[in-house]
Amino acid sequence: MPSTQHLLLKQLLTAATGPLAKYRPRLATMRLAVEALSLGQLMPWNVFLTDVNIEGMAAEWVRPAGAPPERVLLYLHGGGYVLGSLNSHRSLVGTLAQRCQLNALAINYRKAPEYPFPAALDDALLAYQWLLGQGHLAQNILVAGDSAGGGLTLALLLALREAGQHMPAAAVGLSPWTDLVLPAPLLRRVAREESQVLEALEIHNWGTMYAHHLPLAHPLVSPVNGELHGLPPLLIQISDAEVLGDDVMRFAAKAQAAGVPITLQVFEGLVHWWHLFWRFVPEARQALDQVAAFSRQVWADQPPTAGAQPAAAA
């Protein structure tokens, strides 16, 4: 049973997104609103920020006090490939980095419709290669993302495998968007099961903006359609009430059948993006603690020599 805090959050989201569903504000207006709401975020104590420029792409290090330098978290934020920024997810990345005791690199990848596919994927690949160039070993990198960022995380793994490049140690998808097709019967469930949140945010249109000339079913756009063999250990978290849930379950079953070590954690009755509200919602803190436990297990399962080489200063 969801907590009282979550029930209150769901009511607030329903009240806030109802007008959006009715009036359909422009994307530019929604972007401004997301940035304005980001101003109220608070970083966890003893987490420090450093701006980074990666070949023209804005990024930042999110460094918890005492985190060892050799292991890092590459974080890809959500927002339907059209919204979100370093600002919108800074608090979430900060608490996740602190709980995992990892220095996190968050990137401001390019957004559709101005920059459709493959811009976001190219930027994720650029960030990953940049980390390697800074001296971080692939087996010391954990990649994570939420919603569209979770889908981008999985697409990054597929792209790395196809290019014959070294895989990261593991990856985490927080309610990942694995299938952008979203057929009409599925969309009709949104108002009933997602309290109009996804419908209000026009997620189907966003997928089309991102895919551009590619079919929505393309594996690097909708990872559920990819060949999933050879991927590193995965942790996937989803709520059974999310409209994206069925597709995530399908991805998890397909990955398991392909021999991927995958941990699927299903939460009861929670809204999409519940992780963002970690200060208020206990289920979010529980989920992030489970991500931290997963990351610790990943390092514990590695051979003793895997983390022996120190990373260059970034």
Image (cartoon, rainbow, N blue to C red):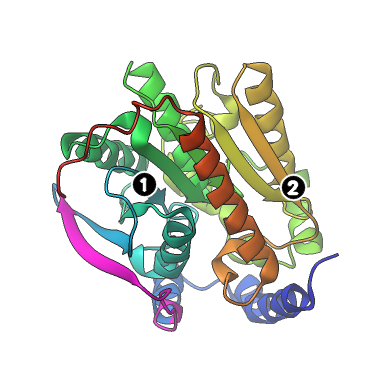
Residue occupying image coordinates x 31% and y 20%: 165
Instruction: Label 2: state its secondary structure.
Output: strand
Among all residues in the image, which is located at the extreme front? 304
Residue linked to disc 1: 74
Which stretch is magenta?
A: 37-54
In magenta stretch: residue 40: yes
- Rounded to the nearest angstrom, the CA distance separating label 2 from label 1 is 23 Å
Q: Nearer the viewer, residue 250 or 64?
A: 64
Can you say whether 280 is above or below 127 in the image? Answer: below
Whether residue 25 sits left or right of residue 87 in the image: it is right
Whether residue 82 sits left or right of residue 217 in the image: it is left
Question: In the rendered structure, which amino acid carries the disc numbered 2?
Answer: Val
Q: Which of 202 and 219 is in front in this view?
A: 219
Q: Position of residue 73 (x, y in %)?
A: 38, 47
In magenta stretch: residue 49: yes
Tag 1: Cα neighbours inside 10 Å, few (<14), some, or many (≥20)? many
Q: Position of residue 239 (x, y in %)?
A: 73, 53
Instruction: Label 1: state its secondary structure.
Output: strand
Whether residue 145 sits left or right of residue 75 in the image: it is right
Q: Does residue 221 show up?
A: no
**Earlier-in-chain disc, 2 versus 1:** 1
Can you say whether 228 is above or below 186 in the image? Answer: above
Residue occupying image coordinates x 49% and y 59%: 99
Question: In the rendered structure, which amino acid carries the disc numbered 1?
Answer: Leu
Residue 266 numbered tag: 2
Q: Does residue 127 show up?
A: yes
Q: Position of residue 305 (x, y in %)?
A: 34, 26
Q: Where is residue 189 in the image (x, y as percent from the top left)?
A: 79, 54
